[in-house]
Image: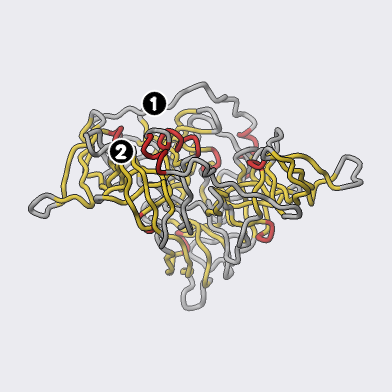
């Protein structure tokens, strides 16, 4: 597809293009109405707003429109390369400043006048070589890119990313206006988190924050200084769950904050008794006052596991007396003939799931399963093997998606007779996508019917992981 400057290009309804915004970044867009005799230099498009909150429709001048660059699979970059990095729903131009391990790079971005260069750690799948669309062709061309890639001899070095905070706002981990949660070491407040907004960075790992729910006596929002170690981003919004399980770790909304506790009793009327180790007490909560507990570790949100909950559960004899000692953690029992999915841990197949049927229960949390798509080496029969219950889950519910998948949405892709967890990194056509697989560091193309919504089986419930609000690919800002 070519677009001529200041002329009507051969655009069609449904074409995937990129639109340049005033901030200089390019955003993926869909053509809703091509140029016409009345609007010869304008095209009507739809794209996501910069904050990702909604879709925007409007006319765009053809000089600010270009086709999506050709997909380059597994391209490596070297120091000094001009690149585009995906951030806040758009592609921003930057320069590779350093090479890290695990397919990551340090990329520098030019700030506004008078501001120092901002550096961020970015994964390879969120980078592409910067190219210009000039008079109907890409510069540099694909042939020039192929020649330059053969000369890339730089190797990742064993470099650890260090965050250095200075007295400038641009060097801070959090920015002015960021929505965060604050905790405290003060007696009576340990284990609780309160919503706040960053007002400014004051240096020496300290911020001035304004609490969203706490106010002074005169009604003015409370402001206080907080250490960086006591601040975290707001956790992502997860899909609502129908019920919580006994001994499940949760956050309870209490006294304008979120307090970490454990479900000690399941009551009637969608109510629960929650035990708090700090302080040592038990309170009752309505279902709507609870949320799934998540831990912020190494720049990522992790849903609490059984190992995380054990110290909370075992911390007090009072809790043990309140809970039924014979109560076991929730486990699904699979009767004979049940259709399930079984996870593989073989090298090269880690994280993939295969359809199977339960043949028999072997005891000790083991089952004999027969795969529905895998056969023995002689292809004479379907493969049977033993599998632990922790490697088995029911078939996902409502997994097929009738809408188009969105950019950077997590999906399961049908490949080699199994389902593989991946991420949509490019919408090629209305019903075709490029999917990136982190386990193999590969990108492959799939039709819509070969994908399904990615869901997690957690504590006996199917949960669709959600994106972080205003999700940023760059987790931390750095100054090396």
Q: Label 1 neighbourhood size at 10 Å, few (<14), some (14-19), many (20+)?
A: few
Q: Position of residue 467 (x, y in %)?
A: 46, 51
Q: Position of residue 229 (x, y in %)?
A: 30, 32
Q: Quadrant of the C terminus?
A: top left
Where residue 109 sits, quadrant-wise, is: top left
Q: Label 2 neighbourhood size at 10 Å, few (<14), some (14-19), many (20+)?
A: few
Q: Which is more N-terminal, label 1 or label 2?
A: 1
The answer to whether residue 460 is seen in the rendering is yes
Q: Which residue is mark 1?
A: 162
Drawn side of residue 245 relative to residue 336, left or right: left
Relative to the observer, which residue lies in front, 475 or 118? 475
The number of numbered discs placed on residues in the rendered structure image is: 2
Q: Position of residue 264 (x, y in %)?
A: 41, 46
Q: Which residue is mark 2?
A: 280
Q: Residue at x 66, y 55 (%)?
A: 395
Element type where label 2 sits in the image:
loop
Say the numbered circle drawn on residue 264.
none
């Amino acid at each position: 597809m070519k677009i001529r400057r200041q002329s009507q290009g051969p655009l069609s309804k449904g074409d995937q293009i990129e639109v340049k915004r005033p901030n200089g970044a390019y955003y993926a867009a869909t053509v809703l109405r091509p140029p016409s005799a009345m609007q010869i230099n304008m095209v009507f498009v739809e794209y996501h707003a910069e904050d990702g909150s909604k879709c925007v429709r409007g006319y765009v001048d053809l000089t600010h429109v270009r086709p999506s660059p050709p997909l380059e699979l597994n391209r490596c970059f070297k120091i000094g390369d001009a690149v585009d990095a995906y951030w806040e729903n758009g592609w921003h131009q930057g320069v590779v400043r350093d090479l890290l391990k695990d397919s990551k790079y340090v990329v520098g971005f030019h700030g506004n006048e008078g501001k120092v260069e901002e550096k961020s750690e970015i994964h390879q799948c969120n980078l592409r070589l910067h190219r210009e669309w000039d008079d109907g062709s890409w510069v540099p061309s694909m042939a020039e890119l192929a020649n330059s890639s053969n000369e890339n001899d730089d190797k990742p070095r064993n470099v650890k990313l260090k965050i250095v905070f200075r007295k400038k706002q641009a060097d801070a981990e959090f920015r002015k206006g960021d929505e965060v949660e604050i905790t405290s070491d003060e007696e009576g407040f340990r284990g609780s988190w309160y919503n706040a907004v960053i007002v400014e960075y004051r240096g020496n790992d300290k911020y001035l924050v304004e609490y969203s729910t706490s106010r002074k006596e005169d009604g003015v929002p409370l402001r206080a200084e907080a250490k960086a170690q006591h601040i975290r981003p707001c956790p992502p919004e997860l899909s609502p769950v129908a019920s919580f399980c006994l001994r499940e770790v949760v956050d309870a909304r209490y006294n304008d904050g979120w307090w970490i506790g454990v479900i000690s009793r399941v009551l009637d009327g969608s109510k629960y008794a929650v035990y708090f180790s700090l302080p040592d007490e038990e309170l009752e909560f309505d279902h709507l006052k609870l949320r799934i507990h998540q831990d912020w570790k190494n720049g990522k949100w992790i849903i609490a596991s059984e190992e995380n909950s054990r110290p909370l559960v075992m911390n007090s004899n009072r809790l043990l007396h309140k809970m039924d000692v014979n109560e076991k953690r929730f486990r699904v029992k699979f009767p004979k003939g049940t259709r399930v999915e079984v996870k593989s841990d073989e090298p090269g197949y880690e994280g993939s799931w295969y359809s199977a049927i339960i043949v028999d229960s072997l005891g000790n949390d083991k089952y004999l399963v027969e795969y529905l798509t895998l056969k023995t080496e002689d292809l004479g029969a379907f493969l049977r093997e033993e599998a632990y219950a922790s490697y088995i889950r029911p078939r996902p519910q409502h997994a097929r998606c009738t809408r188009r998948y969105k950019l950077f949405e997590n999906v399961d892709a049908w490949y080699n007779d199994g389902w593989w967890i991946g991420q949509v990194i490019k919408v090629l056509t209305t019903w075709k996508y490029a999917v990136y697989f982190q386990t193999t560091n590969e990108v492959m193309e799939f039709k819509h019917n070969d994908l399904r919504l990615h869901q997690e089986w957690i504590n006996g419930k199917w949960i669709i992981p959600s994106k972080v609000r205003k999700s940023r690919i760059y987790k931390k800002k750095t100054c090396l």
